[in-house]
Image (cartoon, coloured by chain):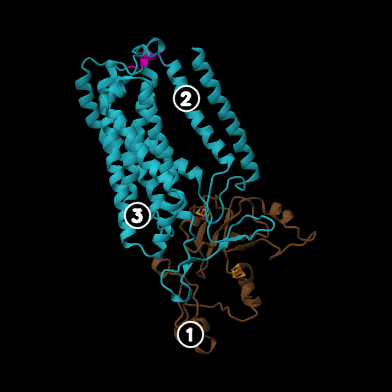
Chain colours: A cyan, B brown
Amino acid sequence: MSVKMKRSMWLCGGVFLVALTAWVYQLRQGLILPNMQNSSSWGLYISGLAFFVGNAAGGLVLTSAIYLYILLLPDLTGKLTRLAIKVDNPHEFSEKWAKRLAPVAMLFTIGIHVVTAWIFSTQGGRDWWFSPAMAPDFVSVAMAVGTTVVLLAEALAYGTGEKYQDAYAILALIIFMATCVHLFLMMNDLVIHAWYGNGETHRIMEIAWGDFAWAHIFEVASLVVAAVLLTQKAVRGSLPLPMLSCGLFIAGVFVHRFLIMPAAYNAIPLTMVPFSLPNTHRSLPIASGRFFRGFSTFVDQYSYMPSSIEVIILLGIVAYALLLVLLAIDRLPILMKEKM
Amino acid sequence: MGATYHAEDGAVLIDYELCIGCRYCMSACPYGVRQFNWEDPAETHKRSEYQDKYHYGYPEEHRHEGRLVYMPMQPKGIVEKCTFCSQYRDKGELPACVQGCPGKARFVGDLDDPDSEVSKMIKARHAFTLLPEKGTKPTVFYLPPKAKEV
Ligand code: SF4
Ligand code: SF4
C-alpha cells in the first residue's frame, strides 16, 4: 500500500469516527442539535438521502450495461478466480445477459428512485414539490450522477489509459444526455410554476431565486461545464481533469438536492390575505418547537441552514463510502491498471 | 407506520407508541399544526424557568380506543398535534379550549347529526374551512363574523 493511499484511508477513517461520535451524541440529545424546526422539519439529512439514493440508483442502472463491465472489471486472481465466469466470447456473452438483466435492473432502480421522488411530490402542503416532473427529473439526475460516480471510481482505480477511453466516452455521453434531459425538465417545471403561479407560488419563487440565486446558478453551471468537459477526449485523456469534472458535477448535484428544501419550507404554507387586498399573502405563524429565552416560539418564516453537527455527520457518511472505495481499489487485484 | 389514524369520532390522532418521528406528516400538513419533540420536553421545561414542581396540562397518560394518544411529557422524537382533548371528551367533558374560551367562540359537536348545534351553525352562518383546495376535507370550520360584529 502506498503512503498516499494509507494517509487517505486514515483521513477517511478519522472523519468517519468523528461523525460516528457526533451521531451517538445526537441520538442521546435528540434532533434539537440540527437546525431544523417545526416549519422546516426535513433538512440536510433528507437531501443527503435523495442524493445517495440517486447515486446508487444511477450506478445500478449501469449494471444493465454489461458491455461496460466486461471492459472495466478487473481480472480476478488467486482465491477470487472462483468468482470469475469464464467468457470465451465477451460480445456474445454481453448480448445474451444484457438482454435478460437490463429490463429487470432498470425497472427496479428506476422504481426506487421514482418512489423517492414521490415522497416529495405527493405532498400537497408544499407547492415547490407539487410537480409531476419531479419523478422523471429525479431519474435523469440519478442517471447523470450515478454514471459520474462510476466514471470517477473507474478513473481512480484504473487510470485514464487508452484502453478505457471507449468505455469512458460512452459514460461521458450518458452523463451529457441525462444532464440535458434534467435541465429541460427542471426549466419546464419552473416556467409552468411561474406562469400559472398565484401569490403564494411567486413568494416561493422569490425564495428560490432571491435568497438562493447563487446556489441555483451553481447547480446549473457546474453540471453544464462538467458534462461538456467530460465529452472532450483531451480532457478524458489526462488524469486530474476528469476527476475534477466529476467532482464538480457531483457537487452541483448535491447543491441541487439541497435546494429541494429551502423553497419548500421557508414560507409557511398557511397564508391569509388581509382585508382581501390583492398580492398581500401573509404566512400565519406556527410554533417552531424550539425554545429560546427572549425569542418568540412562533415563526412565519425560517431560513434553515444546517448546523455543524449535521455537516459533520453527512461528511462522515461520505468518508465511509470513500473508505470502502479505497479499500476495494487496494484489495481487489486490479491487473489492468495503467501507469498513472 | 399507521401511527396517525382517524378515530371513530373523526378526530385525527397520533399513536405515540407507533410514531417513529420521520416527520413525513409534518411535511405533508399544509396547516402547520404538527409539532415534533425536538428534545426531551423535561429539558425544555427546566430551561423555561417555571416554578419548581409546576406542570401544565392534563396530568395523566391517556389511551383512546386502546392507543396511547396523550402523555403529560411526550418522549423526544415523536410528533404530536391537537387531540381535540381526547382525554376530556372520553369522560364526557368539553375540550379545554372550548371550556376556557372567554368569548365562548369555540364549539365542538357531531357533524354527522344534521340537527346538532354545530351542524346548524355551519349551515346558517356560511362556515368555511381553511385551504379547501388542498383536498384535506377538514372538519374544523370557521364562522364568518355576523353583520353587527363587523
Ligand atoms: S412522524 Fe408522522 S408520518 Fe412519521 S410515524 Fe409519526 S405520525 Fe407517522
Ligand atoms: S385545548 Fe383545544 S386546541 Fe388544545 S388539544 Fe384540546 S381541543 Fe385541541
Q: Is residue A298 magenta?
A: no
Q: Nearer the viewer, mark 3 or mark 1?
A: 3
Q: What residue would you read off at disc 2?
A: A324
Is there one chain holding both mark 3 and mark 2?
yes
Q: Chain of mark 1?
A: B
Picture coordinates of residue A159, whole percent (x, y): 36, 17
In the image, farthest residue toward the top? A78
Tell which subunit mark 2 falls on. Answer: A
Q: Quadrant of the C terminus of chain A?
A: top left
Whether residue A159 is visible, yes or no, is yes
Disc 3 on helix, strand or loop? loop
Image marks 3 and 2: residues in contact by CB distance under 8 Å = no
**Residue A66, quarter of the rendered image:** top left
Instruction: Categorize mark 2 by other alpha carbons within 10 Å: few (<14), some (14-19), many (20+).
Output: some
Asked whether the viewer can see residue A132, the reply is: no
Residue at the (37%, 11%) spot, across then down: A77
Residue A306 sits above or below residue A290 on the image: above
Which residues fall within the magenta stretch? A80-84
Mark 1 on the same chain as mark 2: no
Q: Secondary structure at mark 1?
A: helix
Question: In x, y percent, where is residue A316?
Answer: 54, 32
Q: Is residue A144 left or right of residue A41?
A: left
A273 or A96: nearer the eye? A273
Q: Which residue is mark 3?
A: A131
The amino acid sitting under disc 2 is Leu
Q: Which residue is mark 1?
A: B120
Residue A275 lies, in percent from the top left, at 47, 76
Q: Dominant secondary structure of the magenta stretch? A: helix
